[in-house]
Amino acid sequence: MRIRERQYQDASLESLRPIVGETVINLIKDSLGNFGFRTGDGTLVWIMRDAEGNGPGFAEVVTLHPRSLRTKRRY
């Protein structure tokens, strides 16, 4: 594995650290075709692909503030 690939892998794993030990409570999707899941603490994890479609995918972890959990927006 090349250094650049190892750095990408390490950064990807670090971005997932906030969800270690959490419970998946719901699957989510949006109107653009994105999908993922919500954890017990309200964190959203989107499963993404690279823009060109020729590289590895990645997980985008979005930690919500408690106040934003009270909105009526649906995911």
Image: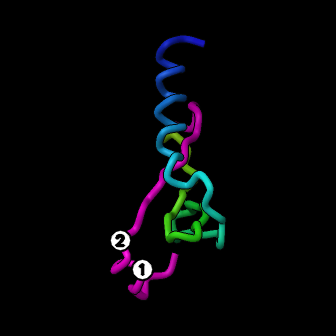
Q: Which residues are magenta?
A: 52-75
The residue closer to the viewer here, 12 or 74, is 12
Q: Quadrant of residue 25?
A: bottom right
Q: In the orientation shown, which residue stands out farthest toward the top? A: 2
The residue closer to the viewer here, 63 or 55, is 63
**Residue position marked by numbered label 2 in the rendering:** 65
* Residue in the picture at 58% in, 66% down: 39
Amino acid marked by disc 2: His
Residue 21 image offset from top left, x and y in percent: 62, 56
Q: Quadrant of residue 66?
A: bottom left
Say left or right for 38 vs 7: right
Residue 69 image offset from top left, x and y in percent: 42, 80
Label 1 sits on a secondary structure element that is helix
Q: Quadrant of residue 73?
A: bottom left
**Residue position marked by numbered label 1 in the rendering:** 69
Residue 56 counted in the magenta span = yes
Residue 59's mark?
none
The residue closer to the viewer here, 34 or 59, is 59
Residue 63 image offset from top left, x and y in percent: 42, 62
**For residue 40, above or below residue 3:** below
Q: CA distance from mark 2 to mark 1?
A: 7 Å
Amino acid marked by disc 1: Leu
- Quadrant in the picture for the N terminus: top right
* Residue in the picture at 61% in, 64% down: 37
* Residue in the picture at 47% in, 23% down: 7
Residue 13 counted in the magenta span = no
What scheme was used to colour the molecule?
rainbow
* Label 2 Cα neighbours within 10 Å, binned few <14 / some 14-19 / many ≥20: few
* Label 1 Cα neighbours within 10 Å, binned few <14 / some 14-19 / many ≥20: few
Label 2 sits on a secondary structure element that is loop
User: Do labels 2 and 1 touch, CB within 8 Å?
Assistant: yes
